[in-house]
Image (cartoon, coloured by chain):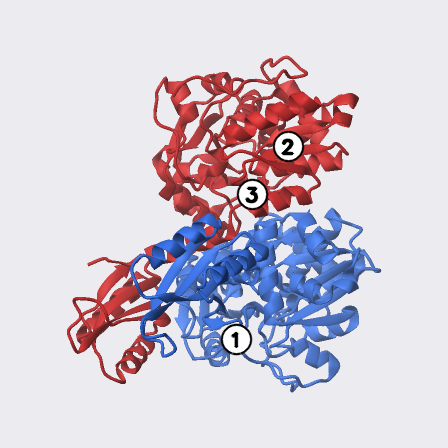
Chain colours: A red, B blue
Amino acid sequence: MSQKRPPAKPSPQPPARVTIADIEAARLTLAAHVLRTPLLAAPPLSALTGAEVYVKYENLQVTNSFKERGACVKLAALEAGERRRGVIAMSAGNHAQAVAYHARRLDIPATIIMPVTTPFVKVKATEALGATVVLHGDTLRQARARAEAIAAERDLAWVHPYDDPHIIAGQGTIALEMLEDAPDLDALIIPIGGGGLIAGNAIAAHEKKPSIEIIGVECALYPSMWNAIHGADKPCGGATLAEGIAVAEAGALTLPVVRDLVSDIILVDESQIERAVNAFLTLQKTMAEGAGAAGLAALLAEPSRFAGRKTGLILCGGNIDPRILASIMVRELEREDRIASFRLTIPDRPGILGQIASRLGELGANILGVDHHRLFLDVPAKGAKLDVTVETRDAAHAEQIFRALKDEGYQPVRMAGGAALE
Amino acid sequence: MSQKRPPAKPSPQPPARVTIADIEAARLTLAAHVLRTPLLAAPPLSALTGAEVYVKYENLQVTNSFKERGACVKLAALEAGERRRGVIAMSAGNHAQAVAYHARRLDIPATIIMPVTTPFVKVKATEALGATVVLHGDTLRQARARAEAIAAERDLAWVHPYDDPHIIAGQGTIALEMLEDAPDLDALIIPIGGGGLIAGNAIAAHEKKPSIEIIGVECALYPSMWNAIHGADKPCGGATLAEGIAVAEAGALTLPVVRDLVSDIILVDESQIERAVNAFLTLQKTMAEGAGAAGLAALLAEPSRFAGRKTGLILCGGNIDPRILASIMVRELEREDRIASFRLTIPDRPGILGQIASRLGELGANILGVDHHRLFLDVPAKGAKLDVTVETRDAAHAEQIFRALKDEGYQPVRMAGGAALE
């Protein structure tokens, strides 16, 4: 990957390295404006991973992500003239809502540029928080160009999502709270998009506890910080469940901090992210978006590295599309064989479906769906195929149902996602 | 409903009215054993309901419900001989896991009786916490008879799910914490099953803040406490999403407390409970089981009553089957027209599906599923029916797609749950 970075807008402060004093000051700024979220031990996740897991619930912020911290610190630092003229930001996600929410609270006009492809619900949510939304461009890059043009034209203050000292200082307040609540944490695993979250928290945590290990996590489809650190050139791109950290270029201010203070970056694949989202939901009863679950995904990817260690995860965001979440949950049930599909070959005469349904009832299988196929080429002239999907107790129960259907002569074939498993 | 109550087992303490001193003592007992859960303002739920909503996150307890409080207080109060011989409880739900978890922590043998119909995952979860599970009977009533026989035979201490002073005192610690964190709460809405949760918290809250209003909530299918208070006889029964509060008889110890301290009981129907579960998930990013969402369901049922008032909800449990939760989420998307199905009439020749799919793509509709029907009786000899299910941005978008399909001559009919809407 090239080291080309987004054109930096001049910032009111020179972009010096953020210090612990900046982060302590940010904490005072945030006190009345942002939730001091709970840090809680997570015994079910500890049992799952072998680490001693603590979770910082940033998804409980009003707009459901940590982005409020940086945005609020940045907005509070503006001068009177800047506040009057207003701010502008470019984001299709959590940063947009965070800026809109705190701008309204501080009575600052906010303009948010989003790509035209942004889901309508996100546009509506941002407008509902009082911001003016401008839809422009098919990509974030085109939207950014438009945002920069508007910012210059109207002299609006630019709120960068990560490459800004105020943003970095604001995000770093999370580690201060975590180490206050659990001073004996051995390691923090922190998601990396542009690097604002990890930079601020690495500075804060190392200052408060020099022995703590900071490990970053990126999704394998967007290893931009990993590339920058390793001088490598892995491709960045593709559809990821963790769109909140799908950033193609490391930040100019965040990269040197990561280089100095972060011991390693773990790359997680989509299936690990999906498992982590599901684990947060089913074990911790909380909703994590893909990026929010990335820390847990890293624990699932390399459990031996954290075995027995007190490991802090930042559940940094909870904004995930309900349809995607529902589909993740159902896929997990299918993987656990708690939802199982069988294709049966049946004689095409009355009463057979009743016989099969009764037999499945005796076996304790709850029928979720039935599909009849008469047009398949491999169906005997007088026969038919029947697909039944049932809810089972577990994999052993699914196997028991399979054997019973076989014993009855229905030649069952296990199906998954429409394809035969065997 | 009759006033017949479950046969009370002799308790080590006389079943005197629980006092604030008992609840304060319970709090000391719980300090090292049970999470002091966060109470957080919930602006999105305030916007939804018009009340100023605060949520107590009892679903963050290790076994994901408030039941740990009472169970832990009860177990800690046992004498040495009782601890050695062990405890017994009857439950298919949260009480089972709460007793098993704290019994293991206190090194007390625990036997849990569950009906044979209990989902296998719940049996496994309880066994994983170290309890001996005995499956007996088709109903809770049969299971209870067996539990009482075993308790007598082996001289085991009985841990009642609600009708016990220690249990009531333990549950009451929730209100102490809530009023410490938010002393200006005007009202608490508290779910009622047997009444242990509301009795303990009504006593604690009234003592700490005499002006506070306590309102109970039951599911309309199981109005047992409502019946007892009103001398009424509404039927109790049926399948409810809130199985955690589906209790057919009010407790002997809890009823007089409710009569004295609870100003009203709101009955909520299944659709209100379902909406509340969905709102917790999509707005608060947290998982509530049906009973856990009952307080919010009451706010949805009677919003005018709480308008502008600081109202505390106890999110008392988060144990909901992932498949049911996924189905609730998808149904809500269908209600909002974010998932829409159309039945089209199409000429049965090559290329039509491609034309329709392309048109839907132009309209920004994401195709989720396609079904072909050739055998319907009302299909013209050379035609076919095609069901397409698409994801839309919102109801207006669904309407736009409908009109476009009509303009193309496909005679679209809106479908919901397999039935035509128009």
Q: Quadrant of the N terminus of chain A?
A: top left
- Residue at the disc numbered 2: A69
Q: Position of residue B62 (x, y in %)?
A: 52, 52
User: Given the image, what chain letter belongs to the residue carrying mark 2?
Assistant: A
Residue A137 marker = none
Contact, CB < 8 Å: mark 2 with mark 1?
Answer: no
In the rendered image of this protein, does residue B96 appear above or below residue B62? Answer: below
How far, Cα to Cα, is label 2 from label 1? 44 Å
Q: Position of residue B126 (x, y in %)?
A: 44, 61
In the rendered image of this protein, does residue B81 appear above or below residue A154? Answer: below
Question: In terms of image quadrants, where is residue A67?
Answer: top right
Q: Residues within 10 Å of mark 1 (few under 14, many from 20)?
A: few
- Residue at the disc numbered 3: A40
Q: Residue at x 51, y 31 (%)?
A: A140
Q: Quadrant of the C terminus of chain A?
A: bottom left
Question: In terms of image quadrants, where is residue A271?
Answer: top left
Q: Nearer the viewer, mark 3 or mark 2?
A: 2
- Observer-nearest of B229 and B217: B217
Q: Position of residue B96 (x, y in %)?
A: 49, 65
